[in-house]
Amino acid sequence: MQPLISVILPIYNIEKYLPECMESVFAQTYKNLEIIMIDDGSPDGCPALCDKYEKRDSRVVVYHKENGGLSDARNYGILRAKGEYITCIDPDDYVDEDYVEYLYALICKYGTKMSICQHRVHYDNGSVKENGSEGSELLRTKTCLKRMLYHDVIDTSAWAKLYHKSLFEEILYPKGKIFEDIGTTYALMMQCGSIAVGYESKYNYIFHQQSIVNGTFHANKFDLISMTDKMAKDVLSVYPDLDKAILRRRVYARFSTLNQMLNTDEYPKEKKKIIQFIKKNWKNILCDRSAPNRDKLGLILLGFNYNLYRACWLGYQSHIMGDLKRKRSNNMKKKKRIEIDFVIPWVDGNDEVWQKKKMQYDPKAGTDAGVNRYRDWETLKYWFRGVEKFAPWVHHIYFVSDEQVPEWLDLSHPKLTWIDHKDYIPEKYLPTFNANPIELNFHRIKGLSEHFVYFNDDFFLIRPIKPTFFFKKGLPCDDAILSPIIMEGKHSPGKMCSNNMGVINEYFDKKVVLRSNITKWISPCYGKYLLRTFCLIPWHHISGFYNDHLPQAFLKSTYREVWNNEFELLDEVCTHKFRDYTNDVNQWLLRYWQLCKGQFMPISPRRGVCFNDVCEDALETIRKQKCSVICINDNEEKDFEGSKKALHSAFEEILPEKSKFEK
């Protein structure tokens, strides 16, 4: 027979949310429940609702008591629970119908006294943040604590967990304290030799702007620091080698508290003490590879200047809350998903007809006409297979070439259009063996969507991606990271980057650009790359950008705008038959233009990886699908045929089946 499981619900002033929570509890597939509702002196209609539920279901037990706070109410229910196991649910949240069954199954599977599941976050605009995935595992207590200290999937919340009642024999929630779970969950874990962790989301957390964490600052919010320090002391006494993780959590607690104090002038001594603690430990956190990038970004900003940190954080909060309001408004309307096209230029360097055409033009000094720019690795079929398997949502693919089509490519596919150079590039620029005219004229492709992604033929999708990998809120996803321009020689790509920046600095003022979109330029998702930006901020002009050699999202309207402003320059560049690093600009100019106008959404620069040759690391990245996008640069491989064979073999492991783009 199934053991009795007690569900603890502390009730206070949540009349609006209680019905949804209780219906989710009543719907549980695990039926042998004791549902304990503790009315903690609630001033609204909750007491009457509790009594109503008690009459409705014999499993419900209601207790009415004077207000003593969340910890006191939880303890009240735990001490009266008759179940062999206990789970806590906040009554303004709700759970999936198999919430209890899933947690109990984990305990049975791994033979533990405690199990954990994941949760979703629901915002009042209707959007949902999914934190779950698939699978489960048994973790030793030490490992579980370490991951919790780093906020790595496992958290300190009382909910989304199932406990054997014996764990509470000597441990209860600290009465009169907020952030009570921080002072309790770790202690419960330390009584277990191991913990069953499930990675599926079964708990639904409702985000409230005025919750304990998000509301106005009061002195009791310093409990976060005291509770964290107590946890640190207790964990360190048993696991001294977790000192780095413990320090990281203590620094995080102070950052979290400081963030809530930014709009108040009260408690100046406490604020000063918090800042001193953070700065004192900056080196340890920056050198800790396991510490989240958000922590490191905060340290860097605070290290520069408190006012800079304050402005960035408040700007970030304002941006997030403004975004939530906009989403709430947009969700009232029916939104049509934007159409995202892919554009991929290609050349078959082995084509004799094309070679003869190329030989008619003598590339002058200072241009790039090397053999590795045109030779064919015969990997194009894997590009199409990757798109079909990992980005099936793509609206249309425009395959661009110079009178060349692979024999195996099925042009009858409804999502594919072959575009010859003469179909969109003005005649006066043709023929061209220069990537720049090919790239700078994409906006002339008939039927191309406003939102499109430019792929080189050495970019490959090797893992599933969503449209939001490239566009969010109708804007390209990109990283705005300042970086110096490196000149490797007279005719290096750095010269072309310098030409791009000459145009950018004519149209954009650096101070205005940064101030207008500070949260996009100082984004936690950039991680350590922010150091580049901070080092270059003092310079008056925009010195240069960090360039990802990855698929690039564009707005077609950006192309038109840049051509309207710089027609003579682009017109001249497009007449060059081969790349001219000394005088050309390239498609990065259009990317920089989008960045400076704020027409982008921040994304991690680590969203993909680029290799300069077919090395073992590159092959392993493909086989194990370590990232979403990979670039394999053609870098004058000595053993071209051997490298090509190895590359094909790696792709065959993850993309063995023909796509519908192949005949």
Image (cartoon, helix red, strand yellow):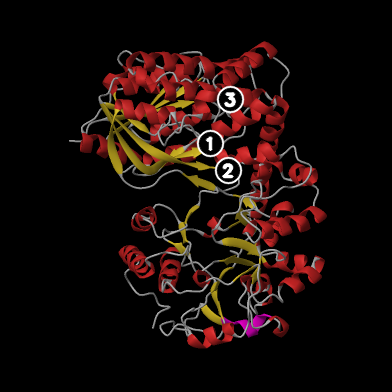
- Can you tell which mark lies on residue 526? 2
Residue at screen point 64% across, 78% down: 447
Amino acid type of the residue tagged 1 in the rendering: Asn
| Relative to 435, residue 159 above or below | above
Residue at screen point 65% across, 80% down: 446
Q: Which residue is mark 3?
A: 255
> Would you say 649 lies left or right of 45 here?
left
N-term mark: 3 or 1: 3
Report which quarter residue 312 is drawn in: top right
Q: Which residue is mark 1?
A: 293
N-term mark: 2 or 3: 3
Q: Position of residue 428 (x, y in %)?
A: 73, 83
Q: Are marks 3 and 1 in contact (CB under 8 Å)?
A: no
In the image, residue 421 lies in the stretch drawn in magenta: yes
Using the image as rendered, state which of residue 232 and residue 569 is in the foreground: 569
- Can you tell which mark lies on residue 634? none
| Relative to 92, residue 123 above or below | below
Q: Position of residue 97 (x, y in %)?
A: 36, 44
What is the spatial separation of the Cα atoms under label 2 and label 3, in whole angstroms?
Answer: 19 Å
Q: Are marks 2 and 3 in contact (CB under 8 Å)?
A: no
Which span of residues is magenta-colored? 419-425
In the image, residue 388 lies in the stretch drawn in magenta: no
